[in-house]
Image (cartoon, grey):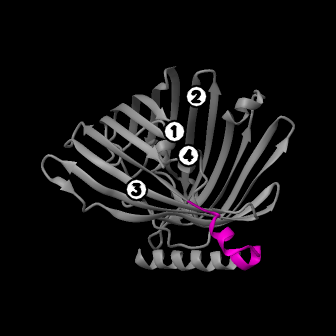
Amino acid sequence: MFTILLRCAVSVISLCMLCKPLLAEEESSFWQGFRVGGYTSADLRIPRTESTRLTWNELSMIVTWDKNTRIKFFGELDLEDPASYTHSQGVDFRDAYINPERLYFDVNLNENSNVRIGRFLTPLGRWNQLHASPLVWTASRPLATTELFPSFTSGAQFFGNIAFKERSLDYQVYTALMNAQPESRGAAQYRDAHGARVSINNVFNFTDENAGLNTIGLNYSGYRDEKSGGSRYRIVGLDFLLEIDRWELSGEAYTRKAERGQSAGSGAYLQSAFLIKDDWYWITRLESLRQPTAQNAERWMLGLTKRLKPNQLLKFEVIGGSGEYNDVPRGFAASFAMMY
């Protein structure tokens, strides 16, 4: 981990210094392009089969550089699980670790295309690319978005947007260039990832105000286990987002095949968010997960989420159904998430 962080730091410093003479700007103007922010969240969980736990989930620092040129930088470094508390163990700091979540440069080629180089969120579906706690409705994440494919890819991505009449098409094509891709602790390890996602915006030709909020996406990826001689997988998926009046509906579905076409798992979720009143939202989710070497799950989730401020969410939810996963236990959860 230390070696990876050191390489990332050296790469960022070197590339930033290269940008400076290329842009031919004053030193003060160069450094004014940097912005620093981040997010954090904490939750209280009362699982069915485990002890009640209060957890500080993450402390994220995000650094960006943008001087309205063709080159942009994005970096995110997370301190994961910095602290937790249970009645039996008291305050515990032993689970804390550093995760270099994202670190990449974007180069704009023209109005329709860009190139991204570095470590980025694997462009499969919507949730994996927008999973920060203050940006999602629930404290728990759908199992289908964590158990079937790699969350991160270290490599290159070609992406952009093409407009046609009232609609537009987003595309993302990517491949791994490095096999050392540290995932969050406990996550499955994969390598040699490659794939693509295309999505059509304003499918139903709504007004400009919510044109981006009715989207259908198609996904494909191939990868294999990190361990030597590991299985190769191919996964295809469908995702959508639809907003109508006070409703937001979203979902994703995936099916995965191993070599010779054997089934290697599948998963899906369907979620709704309904604006009740005064920025209170009623959240409902149904989800399913099938895996040949792990527990299957059929779950439901009911929740209430309050948008305290544009950058703050307060969440309450109950998860029921079958299948037990440590990261997303069944039971009650309350969470607070904030961007800064």
Residue 80: image location, x then y, percent: 37, 58
Q: Is residue 25 magenta?
A: yes
| Amino acid type at image mark 1 | Ala
On residue 309, the disc is: none
Q: Which residue is mark 4?
A: 255
Image check: 225 left or right of 165? left
Residues at marks 3 and 2 touching, judged by CB atoms closer than 8 Å: no
Mark 2 or mark 4: which is in front? 2
Calculate the distance from the C-alpha at mark 1 to the C-alpha at mark 3.
Answer: 29 Å
Kind of element beneath mark 4? strand
Using the rendered image of the protein, determine whether residue 75 is visible from the camera's viewpoint: yes
Mark 2, mark 1: which one is toward the viewer?
2
Segment colored magenta: 20-35
Q: Which residue is mark 1?
A: 268
Which amino acid, mark 2? Answer: Glu
* Secondary structure category for the residue under label 3: strand
Residue 222 percent location from the top left of the image: 60, 59
Return the mark for residue 59. 3
Q: Which residue is mark 2?
A: 248
Q: Earlier in the sequence, mark 2 or mark 1?
A: 2
Residue placed furthest toward the left? 88
Q: Quarter of the image containing the N terminus?
A: bottom left
Q: Earlier in the sequence, mark 3 or mark 2?
A: 3
For residue 267, say whether it is visible. Answer: no
- Residue at coordinates 58% horizontally, 28% vertically from top-left? 248
Instruction: Give whichever of discs 4 and 3 has the lower sequence position.
Output: 3
